[in-house]
Amino acid sequence: MIEMRRLTPATSTIDWDRTAALTEGLLRDGLDEIVRVFIAQGAGAPFVVWNPRPEQLRSEPARHVLAHWSSLADGARLPGYRQVDPADLRPALGYVLLLDVLEDGWDFRYRLFGSTISSVSGFDLTGKLLSEHPASAYVAEFSIAVGRAATRRRQPIYSLRHPVGAQDTSLWERLVLPLADENGHVVRLMVVATPLDRDGKPIRAVF
């Protein structure tokens, strides 16, 4: 555990015990702790579902990437990270994040930070740790917990969250898909993060 904690920047505000509790809740399909944390912060509790069906997804980018991920899966075998071709993700590019799994999911490093996400959020975290995310600590903890749960359960997980204080974004839709190496270990997460406006439509990049 000491080796894993070395990944975390000294300036991090992450509560790792709370993150672990959120992770365990997600793994056993229990959202009580997540609801408690979000309500305490004045935020609405997120909607979370494992193995979402296409009709449960709000945006076309999420539906497209889920269909592509599913097409690469072979029975119980997860898609390999080398199978992902950016050309096949074209309808969703800009909303796609790729994160490397570090120390069995202790933290995650952004390999790709979609241009639309960067435009909407106002920052680019390429090369940064998820624990360095400038969002409120409880939001970053939730994101880490979702990533850890997806890594351990080896299944897609979908969430909807109302951002507090956002002017244009009414919902953040997030689909997390695990990718494996040649030995079957989850080594990367492919994430579709779609900011939705009040009409439920994806917000486009502003350059």
Image: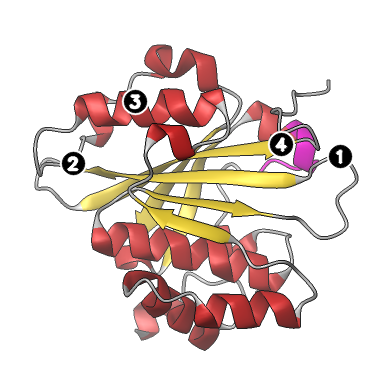
Compared to residue 143, the image places residue 106 above or below, namely below
Amino acid type for the residue under numbered disc 1: Asp
- The stretch of residues the image draws in magenta is 119-124
Label 4 vs label 2: CA separation? 29 Å
On the rendered structure, is 48 left or right of 115? left
x%, y% of residue 3? 36, 78
Circle nearer the N terminus (4, 2)? 2
The residue indicated by pointer 4 is 196
Q: How many marks?
A: 4
Amino acid type for the residue under numbered disc 2: Leu
Label 4 vs label 3: CA separation? 20 Å
The residue indicated by pointer 1 is 168
Circle nearer the N terminus (1, 2)? 2
Seen from the viewer's position, the closer of residues 55 and 78 is: 55
- Asked whether disc 1 touches disc 4, contact meaning CB atoms under 8 Å apart, the reply is no
Compared to residue 80, the image places residue 24 above or below, namely below
Circle nearer the N terminus (4, 3)? 3
User: Which circle marks residue 67 in the picture?
Assistant: 3
Circle nearer the N terminus (1, 3)? 3
In front: label 1 or label 2: 1
On the rendered structure, is 13 left or right of 58? right
Residue 121: within the magenta?
Answer: yes
- Asked whether disc 4 touches disc 2, contact meaning CB atoms under 8 Å apart, the reply is no
Question: Which type of secondary structure does the marked residue at label 3 adopt?
Answer: helix
> Can residue 11 be seen from the camera position used here?
no
Few, some or many C-alpha atoms within 10 Å of disc 3 (few <14, some 14-19, many ≥20)?
few
The residue indicated by pointer 2 is 78
Few, some or many C-alpha atoms within 10 Å of disc 4 (few <14, some 14-19, many ≥20)?
many
Name the residue: 65% across, 65% down.
139
Q: Quadrant of residue 34?
A: bottom right
